[in-house]
Amino acid sequence: MLNKRFKAIALVDFDYFYAQCEELRHPEYKDRPIAVCMLTAKDSGAVASANYVARKYGVKSGMPVSKAKSLASDLVVLPVDMAYYQQVSNKIMKWLQENFKAIEQASIDEAYIDLGEIDKDEAERLGIKIKQLVKESGGIKCTVGIGPNKLIAKMACDSAKPDGLKIITPNEVDSFLEASKLEDVPYIGHKTVEKLNSIGIKTIKDAKALSVDELRKLFGEKRGIMIYNFLRGIDERKLEVTKKRKELEKFVSLKNKKPEEAISEAARKLYERLSGMSFREIGVIVILEDFSSKTKSKTFKYPVSSFEELLSASLELLKSIMSESIDIKIRRVGVKASRFEKKEGNLLDYIG
Ligand code: DGT
Ligand code: CA
């Protein structure tokens, strides 16, 4: 059968995100039910994220902690640690940004990726690759949905959770939608579903029988048109592309350290932040006691991604700055990487 090309959008959504981050740093809880909760006082508050073991007992986001505990007696209740989840998310999002031309970070655990014009086989390969990238950069399992627009990408993703990959080509949109429930359509909340149910409309197929004017009357001008379009898989929303980072830098104060020790620490911190990204230029910034600064940089002939090369170039640049002035009093030092490169050529080349 002809494998037609289409403009594809992917949605990547990290599975049970806060709870999975906790599993990462607490392997001892891995097979236990975990609920990460917004705690207001001891044991009172609501569940923000639950792992799939807890979900088997019926534990869900938004549920009071006391109810969750009554459902799963050995529930591990952990408080939300946003700074940590943000760190895990940043690492993965940066990586995705460096590997794809256009991404829109939609939330802490969701990003849309423009995959360009591809066929179903390429979509499959890219979907697998996205899952690998997320796993390698953040240690996190995720689900990827791919479709001709944001709406279908999101619905495909929701239907494939957890640890899934689902591709819906333009030809498959109608049958996919007809097999979905009204409440599976984003922005059709339970109030809209109730209203539709009250006039005898139970399925997407039923709802498609309503004209755009009827939907406008029921839900207002804008919402009516949106619902009309979404029921047909039509979504013109563009990606709001998150800007690519041009450079990354890390600073370390000397305090009692030698400049070489501080630069090594800055290089290590920078390397962690880079999470495998390669770069063509490296700079060292030295901030003196009087807050003036000196910088030197080096350009590589080839993209570099190893810690050893980053460290030796940083030390070399530091030495060169220090040799140019006698008796300099250093307050802080920094290492900066720039001119990032995709790992290998363009996006599809990446798929080996
Ligand atoms: P998933 O994607 O179904 O495997 O599970 P999650 O936990 O990743 O849920 P998702 O994608 O709806 O939301 C992403 C994160 O946002 C989630 O890990 C915690 C936070 N979140 C979601 N729902 C709630 C909520 O009702 N209350 C609070 N405080 N946080 C929430
Ligand atoms: Ca999620």
Image (cartoon, helix red, strand yellow):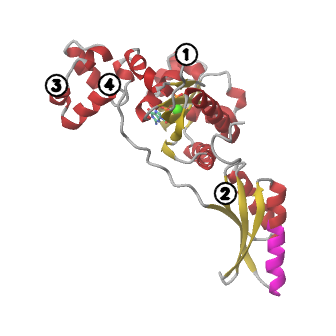
The answer to whether mark 1 and mark 3 are in CB contact below 8 A is: no
Q: Residues within 10 Å of mark 1 (few under 14, many from 20)?
A: few
Q: Earlier in the sequence, mark 4 or mark 3?
A: 3
Q: Residue at x 68, y 54 (%)?
A: 341
- For disc 4, the marked residue is 231
Q: Residues within 10 Å of mark 3 (few under 14, many from 20)?
A: some
Q: Residue furthest front?
A: 2
Q: Nearer the viewer, mark 1 or mark 3?
A: 3
- Per the model, the C-alpha gap separating discs 2 and 3 is 52 Å
Residue 346 in sight: yes
Mark number displayed over residue 214: 3
Residue 299 position by quadrant: bottom right
Q: Which residue is mark 1?
A: 56
Residue 244: image location, x then y, percent? 56, 55
Pointer 2 with pointer 3, Cβ within 8 A: no
The image quarter containing residue 331 is bottom right
Q: N-terminal of the two: label 2 or label 4?
A: 4
The amino acid type of the residue labelled 4 equals: Leu
The type of residue carrying mark 2 is Phe
Alpha carbon distance from label 2 to label 4: 41 Å
- Quadrant of the rendering where the N terminus is positioned: top right
Distance in Å between CA atoms under marks 2 and 1: 43 Å
The residue pinned by badge 2 equals 340
Range of magenta residues: 314-327
Q: Give how far across and how far down residue 251 sits, in percent.
A: 69, 66
Q: CA distance from mark 1 to mark 3?
A: 40 Å
On the picture, is 207 further left or further right than 108?
left
Q: Does label 1 or label 3 sit earlier along the sequence?
A: 1
- Marks 4 and 2: in contact by CB < 8 Å? no
Identity of the residue drawn at 66% across and 82% down? 292
Bin the neighbour count of mark 4 within 10 Å (Cα to Cα): few under 14, some 14-19, many 20 and up.
some
**Marks 4 and 3, how far apart in space?**
14 Å
